Image (tube, rainbow, N blue to C red):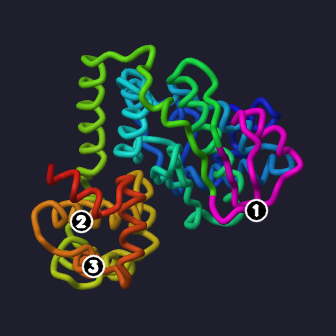
């Protein structure tokens, strides 16, 4: 995004304003940039270039399979497009997407519903366009040719640049629909990928598992916050808020936010990590119902927990439990 803005005459300082990022950190292959920081960059981009037609599409087209390092190599070496999609949904946290893709089958089509309900309204259209375009670009890279979708629908009104979306997605989208989605001919899912390699795929899968493990095994201030979150949740009490956690650590909420930001994370991200780990453990090792798991994790409604679990894993709790039981 910073590179695209520079090509449009917007200096990197404008895109990085209000974040802890600089040019050196952008070039650091080991740097981890959390979602809140990326969101700040996105808002700066939309603020600077939001009057450009099809901004999300143009940015999304810059995402290729090589953008994602080992995650991308795992997709490339997958046996089929279907296997690559399954892998990507399982390790979604290693990808770029803000929108949540949820896959399902319907007669004669493989459908990906793209959920944007939790995305802030001021950047929602940009991120839906960017994420859907990038997903399409990556899948096209995998099969070695442009992927023709069978259907595409968007929740936002038809823009003046609808033809641009049609050109990119190789199908005429419908707009002002109840959901965002695109569909693929199931035949595409079973065709071998041109660069499939079982040995490379296994190696990449192992490295992705290790990367996710390292990201979740946080240290320092993040580890201290996690330790305070687990007893409350595991003891079936509502998780403490950030103000309560800050008091237990003898610091102000502002200081805690700043220290977590410096560690590349945030209170909400850590709460999600703890909830996900406990949810996976309870769904795998106990006979608790989904409703009971939701209550023990501090969710007022099962539907909220189910949505969050899909965002974390790409699966519903019931589907996750079935898969682990095999």
Residue 315 is marked as: none
Is residue 221 at least partly visible in the picture? no
Residue 155 within the magenta-colored segment of the rendering: yes
Where 46 falls versus 194 (above or below)?
Answer: below
Foreground of the two, 246 or 217: 217
Q: Residue at x 35, y 61 (%)?
A: 316
Q: Bounds of the magenta span? A: 151-179
Q: Position of residue 147 (x, y in %)?
A: 61, 29
Is most of the magenta stretch helix, strand or loop?
A: loop
- On whether residue 92 falls in the magenta region, the answer is no
Which image quarter: residue 175?
bottom right
Q: Which residue is mark 3?
A: 291
The local crowd at label 2, few if under 14, some if 14 to 19, many if 20 or more residues have their Cα within 10 Å, is many
Taking the image as shown, residue 230 lies to the left or right of residue 142, namely left
Q: Which residue is mark 1?
A: 176
Q: Are marks 3 and 2 in contact (CB under 8 Å)?
A: no
| Farthest residue, direction front | 107
Residue pictured at 60% horizontal, 35% vertical:
136
Q: Looking at the image, is mark 1 or mark 2 earlier in the sequence?
A: 1
Q: Is 9 above or below relative to 106?
A: above
Q: Which one is in front in this view, the residue at disc 3 or the one at disc 2?
A: 3
Say which label, 3 or 2, has the lower sequence index: 2
Say which residue appears at 20% left-offset and 67% top-offset: 227
Nearer-N-terminus badge (3/1): 1
**Res. 279 mark:** 2
């Amino acid at each position: 995004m910073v590179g695209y803005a520079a090509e449009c005459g917007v200096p990197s300082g404008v895109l990085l304003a209000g974040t802890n990022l600089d040019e050196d950190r952008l070039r650091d292959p080991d740097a981890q940039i959390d979602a809140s920081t990326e969101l700040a960059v996105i808002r700066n981009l939309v603020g600077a270039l939001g009057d450009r037609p099809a901004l999300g599409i143009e940015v999304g087209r810059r995402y290729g399979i090589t953008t994602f390092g080992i995650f991308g190599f795992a997709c490339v070496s997958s046996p089929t497009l279907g296997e690559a999609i399954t892998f990507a949904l399982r390790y979604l946290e290693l990808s770029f997407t803000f929108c949540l893709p949820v896959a399902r089958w319907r007669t004669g089509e493989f459908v990906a519903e793209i959920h944007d309900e939790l995305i802030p309204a001021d950047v929602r259209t940009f991120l839906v366009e960017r994420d859907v375009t990038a997903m399409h670009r990556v899948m096209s890279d995998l099969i070695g040719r442009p992927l023709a979708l069978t259907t595409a629908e968007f929740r936002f009104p038809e823009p003046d640049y609808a033809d641009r979306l049609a050109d990119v997605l190789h199908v005429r989208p419908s707009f002002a629909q109840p959901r965002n989605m695109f569909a693929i001919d199931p035949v595409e899912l079973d065709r071998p990928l041109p660069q499939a390699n079982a040995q490379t795929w296994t190696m990449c899968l192992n490295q992705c598992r290790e990367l996710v493990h390292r990201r979740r095994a946080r240290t320092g201030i993040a580890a201290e916050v996690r330790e305070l979150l687990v007893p409350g949740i595991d003891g079936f009490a509502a998780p403490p808020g950030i103000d309560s956690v800050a008091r237990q650590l003898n610091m102000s909420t502002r200081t805690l936010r700043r220290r977590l930001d410096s560690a590349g994370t945030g209170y909400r991200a850590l709460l999600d990590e703890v909830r996900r780990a406990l949810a996976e453990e309870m769904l795998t090792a106990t006979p608790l119902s989904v409703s009971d798991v939701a209550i023990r994790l501090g969710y007022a409604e099962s539907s909220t927990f189910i949505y969050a679990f899909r965002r974390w894993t790409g699966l519903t709790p019931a589907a996750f439990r079935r898969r682990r039981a095999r």
